[in-house]
Image (cartoon, coloured by chain):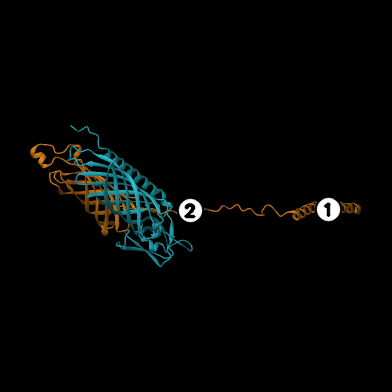
Chain colours: A cyan, B orange
Amino acid sequence: MNSGMKPPVIQVWFFAFCWICMMLGAAHVAAATDDAASYPRVIVAEPFIELHTGAGKGYPVYHVVDRHEWVEVLVRQGDWFKVRDRLGKEGWVLIDEMEKTLSAPGVTTQFERIKKEHFGARTYEGGINFGDFEGSAIMGVYAGLNFNDNLATELEISKATGQFTETLVARINILSNPFPTWDSAPFFTLGGGYMRNKPKSSFVFANPTSDLFASVGLGYRQYMSKRVFFRADVKQNIVFISDNNNGDFLEWKIGFSFFY
Amino acid sequence: MENRVFLFLLVLTLGFSLGNVSAAEADGANITEETSGDAEAPLEEPLITPTVKRNKIKLARIDTEDFLIGIFGGSYSIEDFGVHPVYGARVGLLLTETFFIDATMGFSKAGPSSAEKLFNFDLLTEQERELVYYDVSVGYNLFPGEAFMGDDTAFVTTLYVSVGAGSTQFAGDDYFTLVGGIGYRIVLTDWMAAQVDFRDHIFESDIMGDAEIKHNIEYTIGASWFF
């Protein structure tokens, strides 16, 4: 009876995603083969550099390249570089060894390393967080833009699934970072948005409701390593249910974020 | 004869001297101009104009591959509703050589439960039988290693564990889900890897009357591409 039903919208988007991935994959492979002749080269200045079989300290060293030999740098994965020597042997070298090579006579090679200092000067950030929303488990994602060291804005979408209702929360926040140079620092948030409550399907006669809300909050962020930092938030939400009725909901979340 | 010779030599001498005088006059005129020019203003044009173009050195960008995009398919056991095929996609980000983050989304569809088969009734509509799950998990590369095939082929491999949280949409509701799993990834080429995953999706549901902790276990095989 339902054989002619159209697939749900989400599945259409899923297939579109897979198709885009395949196109990207094909383009990536094509680009890789096109650029075969243009890999940068560096010259080994230390007595030798070690080539590991894989991108990790756990992988064994299977080949070394001597001083004054050059290697082509093919790809980077985290702090590891895949290189190819004159004889065609490929292997992975750690950034610490790569930074002792020379890219031109007398010029030491330099690679971009994300350090703590970049954290304070970040522009974009995004992350996921999990927590509690008045007894219901809540899960959210957010994307933020830092205008300057002290002021940022972010858009947050969260979903709380409770015993009786599901709540979708869309919020815009303004953040104040009074201590941008500290690795561990508090911050303050002020925001507002839209909240939609959908009762669980076992409550057949209940209707979904949607309301505007405002929130004020306090947070804590801790720089971890590379591009990752830890973030904890507590917010007090005031929901404008009707003219003479407001609801208070306390929400706390912890999560991991990335910055660029 | 002597007169002719003398006449010839005279003409020659005159010719020479006339030529010299005219040259001297011309030089003299130029010199005069230049010196007068020098006295008034410095030279405006440079003496030498190089025509060599400076090469702009462009530092090569090294391709960074920290992202992973993959698809997978396999079996998903929906507790109370049987085992059914699942397919999905994941996006991964390599944090360090040991940690990575995965965002996964999967689709499955439940069949009739044993109760529905025994008593011949429908607990859920067709639309409610569609299951969609999405989650974000942190993975830890527990045992990196290599796999050897034949005499001279080796692939880089890693056994990893992952924990995460997300949501499962089923029977018209969203359930907050915890996900824990173990997987094995084998890196086939520079840009592609294959992986096998076992994951347990844990959530609380009251579809069958009482609120119970459900364990939906899935096992999938997938392929991922590095970007």
Q: Where is residue A248 shown, x and y percent of the image?
A: 27, 48
In this rendering, is residue A96 above or below B121? Answer: below
- What residue is drawn where x is 89% and y is 54%? B6
Q: Which label belongs to residue B58? A: 2
| Residue A206 appears in the rendering | yes
Q: Counting residues from the N terminus, which is met first, the one under dot 2 or under dot 1?
A: 1
In this view, the residue farthest toward the right is B3
The amino acid sitting under disc 2 is Lys
Q: Amino acid at mark 1?
A: Val
Chain under numbered label 2: B
Q: Residue furthest bottom?
A: A47
Is residue A39 left or right of A165 when viewed as pictured? right
x, y percentage for residue B173? Answer: 21, 42
The chain identifier of the residue carrying mark 1 reads: B
Q: Quadrant of residue B62?
A: bottom left
Frontmost residue, B140 versus A22: B140
Label 2 sits on a secondary structure element that is loop
Q: Are marks 2 and 1 on the same chain?
A: yes
